[in-house]
Amino acid sequence: MNRPKFYVYLPIIFSLILILGIFIGTTFHPTGNLGTISVDANNKYNKIEEILRYIQQEYVDTVNNKQLVEKTIVSMLQNLDPHSSYISADELQANNEPLKGNFEGIGIEFNIVEDTICVIAALPGGPAEAVGIQAGDKIVAVEGKKAAGIKITNKDVLEKLKGKGHTKVKVSIMRRGKPQLLAFTITRGTIPIFSIDAAYMVNPKTGYIKISRFAATTYDEYIKSFEKLKELGMQQLIIDLRGNGGGYLNTAVDIADEFLSDKKEIVYTQGKARPKKAYKATSKGDFEKGKLIILIDDGSASASEILAGAIQDNDRGMIVGRRSFGKGLVQEQSEFTDGSAIRLTIARYYTPTGRCIQKPYTEGVEAYYNEEYKRYTSGELENADSMKIADSLKFKTPEGKIVYGGGGITPDVFVPLDTAGRSRYLSEVIYSGILNDFAFNYADRERKKLNAYNTFKNFNNSFLITDEVLNEFTEYAQKNKIVPNAQQIKLSKEIIKIQLKALIARNIWSNEGYYPVIQSRDNVLKKAIELMK
């Protein structure tokens, strides 16, 4: 969520009408006297139009007027608040896809391993699966042009493989055990983007659902996951919103409605030009009485905070983890005829007790986003007592519980950041991607043996990362210029083994294999399970 520094300070007086006027084109008039910019005294908002006209006519070099206008709009919106933004036509589709819940492409999960596009999985029912693309395949050419060994990036892969539905793309595949390249022609189609990362039983009574964003399809995905867990005997539920940066307000409201009884308030919004609008629960909820815990951290923002705040303020469940991000501003997207759009903050949202949990942004965009780092340096992530909250920001729930506003949702139960077993070596192998690369190569090489487990449960109960595999990994890392450090490897040994097992499982069973393994060391989830007892 980092934003670039802004250098152009423009008066915050320009209305949405002005922005629209700039977008649809401005008619320029001749200048007045030399050195004087003509401005209509009856319309003070014309100044920006006159400046743009003056620059275009008199500036020493030729100016790209479209770029100048777009940079002006970006700076203008950044001066309002950190979340009002301009999105160019080129970026709009990519920005909207995760929230729409689908995109057009060939339907694969991939990693770039050793400068090669490696297929982690062909999505079920997708175009790639339909023609026979398999996990482990390596895409070495697209439309006859080399796609391996050229320092390819994720952006390059998307540009080559995504495209309009019903268009075709030719790929050349290298497959283990096949001496020659395999040629496939794939007809692109609509591919779902799922926002439920995992849904499984953490014990015989407790279900776990991880939601990564609140998209148009999230509520339907949630209902399917809930029904699946209910059939497995779920009586209590953990919803994981850690790292969930938000999405559609209405989606968060719909999911909150599943947990709250009829007419309970979920959230309300209000702005200068927008009267108060309250969102309340209906009678449709399917889990209004079972034990409920919501997991949050500093990456939980916006719609995540709406859901967590509604549960906390109605005394419906427990919030566990660390303080959330603190985004209490509501944006409305308006699109222009050229395909671009602005997202303008039009209201604040408030939790049922009346809290606005928007954190301050008066010191500018850079300071606003660096606030998360300050939490780390101040010790807040390791000690709840490091949080400084004014008495004026305290509110009471109907049952008398104290809750806080002014900068995120404060959890009912704080769980410190787990730093045990951390080392510089561990950071290097994680952030370099070496762990991912080794896990893919291992899973590809041992795919028959891994598939012989038949189910993830059998794999999880029986498969171990031995010291021999760990040594193989450290040798692989060394070949990739990561110098081994015996003391640090010993310190991080168990974390590395769990990471490798989880990544190998992901290559065979996708996220349904990854999360149960990686979360075996998750102290926040462990605390939630303990509290359920």
Image: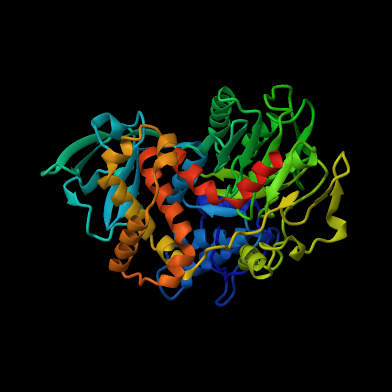
In the image, taking residue 252 as reference, residue 449 lies left or right, namely left
Compare residues 171 and 451 and report the one nearer the observer.
451
Q: Measured from the top left, where is residue 510 in percent x and y?
A: 41, 40
Give above or below for 492 relative to 284: below
Q: Measured from the top left, where is residue 460 in percent x and y?
A: 44, 41
Q: Measured from the top left, where is residue 222 in percent x and y?
A: 57, 31
* Residue 197 makes an appearance in the image: yes
Q: Residue at 45%, 70% (x, y): give it.
A: 488
Q: Residue at 52%, 68% (x, y): give it.
A: 54
In the image, taking residue 20 as reference, residue 144 lies left or right, namely left
Q: Residue at 32%, 36% (x, y): give it.
A: 451
Quadrant holding the C terminus = top right
Give above or below for 119 relative to 67: above
Compare residues 436 and 170 and report the one nearer the observer.
436
Give above or below for 344 relative to 214: below
Compare residues 94 and 47 and report the one nearer the observer.
94
Give above or below for 184 relative to 391: above
Q: Measured from the top left, where is residue 442 in percent x and y?
A: 30, 50
In the image, taking residue 24 as reference, residue 205 lies left or right, namely right
* Residue 302 makes an appearance in the image: no
In the image, taking residue 213 as reference, residue 433 lies left or right, namely left
Within the image, what quadrant is residue 44 found in? bottom right
Within the image, what quadrant is residue 210 found in? top right
How is the protein colored in the picture? Answer: rainbow
Quadrant holding the N terminus = bottom right
User: How many numbered markers are drawn?
Assistant: 0
Compare residues 256 and 42 and report the one nearer the observer.
256
